[in-house]
Image (spheres, helix red, strand yellow):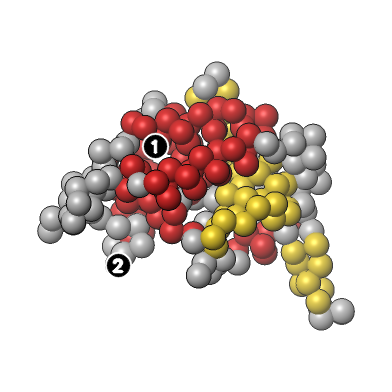
Amino acid sequence: MSCSSLYGITKDYKGKEIIEYKNSWYFSPVVWNVLSDKLLPRKYGYIQNVIGLDGQEVWKNINNILNDSDFLADRVVWELSNQEIFRTKDKNIITDCIRDFLKVNSKYDKSDEDNISVLKRDHIIERWNEIATDIENLNEEEYPFFVFKNTSCDDSVEFWFIKYNEESDEYESRGLNECEDLVTEFVIIENNSIVDYIPNTEYKY
């Protein structure tokens, strides 16, 4: 079964997996389905799916709508699910957004069988509150940044923090600031609002 995880990022931009969560379907895929149901029309009676054949277009449509939105909970949780990097100094705002998302979006993504929103299911509520609490408990001095990794089926986050050494034929630790490719962004929150996204190739601590 795939897992998701919380990564702390140090001042020298090195990443460390701090906590692993069993069953990666309990967070990011829930976010994508709920926001698709909330923001996009259904297609042939079904919620448009980020993981489906039209997934890239669905993702783009949701992202465009949220970039013009002032509703912080939806925007923050969306960016968490997209493996964007947040500053730990904003952790209280972020955890409030996770808990607010659970409450304000509890009418979306209802099962055809029992008509209950996925966000009202006990195991989902438990997982979301667990993630929020773990973010709250991050030590800002030790980890000034963090990222939520969606699934162990994808190792892209790990490769932000390692590089291949041809001489030794081994992978070595590196800081994200050494990564020359655009792989993620730092989300900048000021005055309870997302004000900017800074590419990893440009961010300076």
Tell which of 120 and 100 is nearer to you. 120
Do tag 2 and tag 1 residues touch (Cβ < 8 Å)? no
SS for callout 2: loop
State the residue at coordinates (39%, 37%): 102
Left or right of 58, for residue 43: left
**Disc 1 marks which amino acid?**
Leu
Can residue 62 be seen here? The reply is no
Q: Report the residue marked by disc 2.
A: 53
Q: Residue furthest left?
A: 44
Number of marks in the image?
Answer: 2
- Looking at the rendered structure, which numbered label has been put on residue 102? 1
- Pinpoint residue 30: horizontal percent, then vertical percent: 38, 51
Secondary structure type for disc 1: helix
Residue at image position (72%, 59%) is 161
Q: Residues within 10 Å of mark 1 (few under 14, many from 20)?
A: some
Q: Nearer the viewer, residue 201 or 18?
A: 18
x then y, percent, for residue 113? 18, 56
* Left or right, residue 132 beside residue 75: right
Q: Is residue 156 visible?
A: yes
Which residue in the rendered view is the most extreme toward the top? Answer: 191
**Residue 124: percent from the left, percent from the top?**
42, 48
Q: Which mark is residue 200?
A: none
Give, as a three-letter code, the residue at label 2: Leu
